[in-house]
Amino acid sequence: MQITNVQVIPVELGLHLPYRTARQSEIESITAIFVRVDTREGRTAWGCAAFDPTASGETPETVVRACHACADRARDLNPLNTEYALDELSQLTPGCPSALCAFDLAFHDLLGLAAGMPLYRLLGGYRHRIPTSATVSIAPVKETVALAQQRARQGFRILKIKGGIDPEEDVRRVRAVHEALPHMTLRLDADQGYTVQQALEVAQALEEWLEMLEQPTPADDLDSLEEVTRHSRVPILADESVADPASALKVVSRRAADGISVKLTACGGLRCSRMVDAVARAAQMATMVSCVNEPALLTAAGLGFALGSPNVRYGDLDGHLDLINDPTVPSFRLEGGELIASNVPGLGCRVEL
């Protein structure tokens, strides 16, 4: 297959609900960089880069620059030779995994189109639907409950509550949500904000109500993460501590967490994320497929990955929900808090740009 044209298209997208975490002040918009790939055979595929600048250090300028470098090189590559093609592009994207992710998605989209298969079947077809959590950003207790009730009205049965600034306030927020929505499954994401002692105190206070506590301690401090995991009765998930297969191997070799969270855009795409999942699976540790604030095109890719692997136990794929004027028209469905794949080949999305 011959690539004839590659377009790199940055898009600014607003959010219906401002988003706040322990490491970010209020976010009202994001920059997404779409990549369109056309081939001589008349096929068009799409990829997308989105990123958390506080976690990755990426900026719109660095991502666009890396995407243009990949676009120039991609014209000489056969995208169906995905291992070779993505290995070549990885040399152009050091420190910029979201740019590599954009081309990884486009190449897998082309692979699915050429095979006439949806991504989730291409990657194994283990299931066709998975429950997903909806995120509740940091807010005062009453506002947290109101946001949680709004997500419940949308049909979600799992909530991920952001925390990490004030452990005692986090406990009050989780308890208040449980009292208001007693049948809801709750997760708490501390976003690296706790000490070991704080993490253990929060876990003890909430052990009856939490499904998991995500990344309670700093990403680069595996000693602390391991200590929390060893003593907590609440399962601990590593998120920012895992950026690639090498860091995943460090976490699993120390049993520093009970499970691993993978974000496609932070890892560099499907190819890298599947390697991380294989490491976790070999260690008999569950994987969660997660996201940043991102267009539905990225959600579709994360869904395909999650549905293809029997080791993916958790879905956290809500990053597209609050975007304004997302140009992606997905074919997957959200029903009763579950994402359900379609049988449209490739990523199964139309992009109106």
Image (tube, helix red, strand yellow):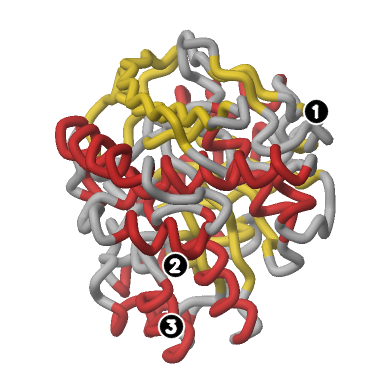
Residue 196 falls in which quadrant of the image? bottom left
Q: Residue at x 76, y 27 (%)?
A: 333
Label whose residue precedes the other's in the sequence (1 or 3) = 3
Nearer the observer: mark 1 or 3; the answer is 3
Residue type (three-letter) at the residue carrying disc 3? Leu
Q: Is residue 122 left or right of residue 318?
A: right
List the residue tagged with mark 1: 335
Image location of residue 261, percent across then percent down? 50, 61
State how far apart marks 2 and 3 are (Cα). Answer: 12 Å
Q: Among all residues in the image, which is located at the extreme bottom?
A: 253
Nearer the observer, 15 or 152: 15
Q: Is residue 239 left or right of residue 160?
A: left
- Pointers 2 and 3 in contact (CB under 8 A)? no
List the residue tagged with mark 2: 238
Q: Secondary structure at mark 2?
A: strand
Q: Residue at x 36, y 24 (%)?
A: 7
List the residue tagged with mark 3: 249
Residue type (three-letter) at the residue carrying disc 2? Ala
Residue 99 falls in which quadrant of the image? top left
Image location of residue 15, percent across then percent down? 40, 16
Dot 1, how many residues are within 10 Å of its Cα: few (below 14), some (14-19), or many (20+)? Answer: few
State how far apart marks 1 and 3 are (Cα). Answer: 35 Å
Label whose residue precedes the other's in the sequence (2 or 1) = 2
Q: Is residue 315 above or below residue 295?
A: below
In which quadrant will I find the N terminus? top right
Residue 168, labelled with which disc?
A: none
Q: Secondary structure at mark 3?
A: helix
Dot 2, how many residues are within 10 Å of its Cα: few (below 14), some (14-19), or many (20+)? Answer: many
